[in-house]
Structures are given as structure tokens and as C-alpha cells.
Image (cartoon, grey):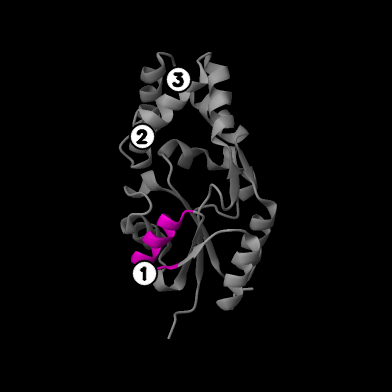
Amino acid sequence: MTAAIRCVLFDFDGVLADYDRDVRIGHLAHFLGRPSHAVRAAIYASGVEDAADAGLLDADAYLEALGRELDCTVPADAWVDARRAATHEKPPMLSLASKLRARGITVAMLSNNGLLMAQSWPAIVPALFPLFSGRAFCSAQLGAAKPSPAAYLRCLEALAMPPPATLFVDDNPANVAGARAAGLVGHCFAGITELQRALEEHGLA
């Protein structure tokens, strides 16, 4: 018999919020007085972002590493402002998550991100809090990133939730496959209508 779903674990970017990488890069480039291509390379081509997502760099070390790549100081507030400018919550998804919570379902969030993001959630997406307070996880906090099964299992350990009772929702098929390998129920997000249909199949809508 299939276990009853008691937890819905959401991805962040692309599921609970829209995220525009180009806006983030442009915003930070303008603040730092550096060309956008240099900021893009510093974040995504240097390995700095991947190291932060894996928990190998704390928030200060991450900003220092970006600064070395760009030959300037990268203030935390400038980074947060750029991330906030590029991130917009999806009100219908937040409404859905709120309804699940009101029904007694645990709602949580798992994102491949570094410790600076983990520290800055409420400043970047205040609309998600307090709904996800204490249940918003970044891969850096777990020492493993999606799609590694360890990322999901460590997250669920913190939530005291068994994998078969957890529905994981992500727009990246590889991440959904990783969740299923860890024993979770997976749903590849393609829009709220399909998600609502999946929730209905589990008696959650």
C-alpha cells in the first residue's frame, strides 16, 4: 500500500518563485561597476557558486571568492539586493502551499543554494515567510546538493519525515529522479494545474 503523503517538499526557483538569472547578473554588475560577462563568469564559470552550494564556502568566504574573481569587494547587501530583484514569488503556489499547511500537511522547501541564501531567505522572498520558517533548506546546509539522494534524506531527517510520506516537487527532471531514488514520491513541475491534479491523486486537494 502506498504511504499517505504527510509532507510536500518544494523546489524554490521555478516552482515557488520565478527567477531571472540575467536580472541578477545585471543588477550586481551595475552596483559593482563590472561588465555583466565578468560577473556571470565569476558566479557560474569559476566554480565559486558550485562550491558554495555544496557547503564548501560559508557566506563570507563565498563573497570573498567572488571579490577575488572580480577584483573588488562584493557586499552582502548588494548580493541580496540583486537576488531579490531577480526573484518573484508565485502567489498561486503560495496559496496552494498555505492550503496544504492548513490541512495539516508539512510544507518545506529544498533549494540548491549556498549559506548566504539560507541566511537571507526572508529578505529575498518575504512572502514565503513565516509559512516556510524553519523548513527552508539550502543544499549548503545539508552538505549535499540535488540530485544526490543524500540531499533529500538529510533534509527529511531534519523534518523528521519518512521519504515514502513525502511528495517532492521540482521543475528539473534530474532532481525529481534523484528524489525518487531516495524513496520520495516525485512530481516534475510543469505548472500548477498538473500539480493540483497530482495532489488530488494523493487525496491532498
Answer with left or right where residue 101 lies relative to residue 46.
right
Looking at the rendering, in which quadrant would you find the C terminus? bottom right
Q: Is residue 143 above or below residue 26?
A: below
Q: Which residues are magenta?
A: 172-185
Looking at the rendering, in which quadrant would you find the N terminus? bottom left
In the rendered structure, which amino acid carries the disc numbered 3?
Answer: Ala
In the rendered structure, which amino acid carries the disc numbered 1?
Answer: Gly
- Secondary structure at badge 1 equals loop
Dot 2: within a 10 Å radius of its alpha carbon, few (fewer than 14), some, or many (20 or more) residues? some
Kindly report the secondary structure that dominates the magenta region of the rendered protein: helix
CA distance separating discs 1 and 3:
41 Å
Q: Nearer the viewer, residue 166 or 141?
A: 166
Residue underneath mark 1: 183
Give the mark, 3 or 2, whose residue is nearer the N terminus: 3
The image quarter in which residue 162 lies: bottom left
**The disc label shown at residue 38, or none:** 3
x, y percentage for residue 7?
Answer: 50, 67
Residue underneath mark 2: 58
Residue for point 40% across, 66% down: 160
**The disc label shown at residue 161, or none:** none
Residue for point 46% across, 26% down: 40
Q: Nearer the viewer, residue 193 or 151?
A: 193
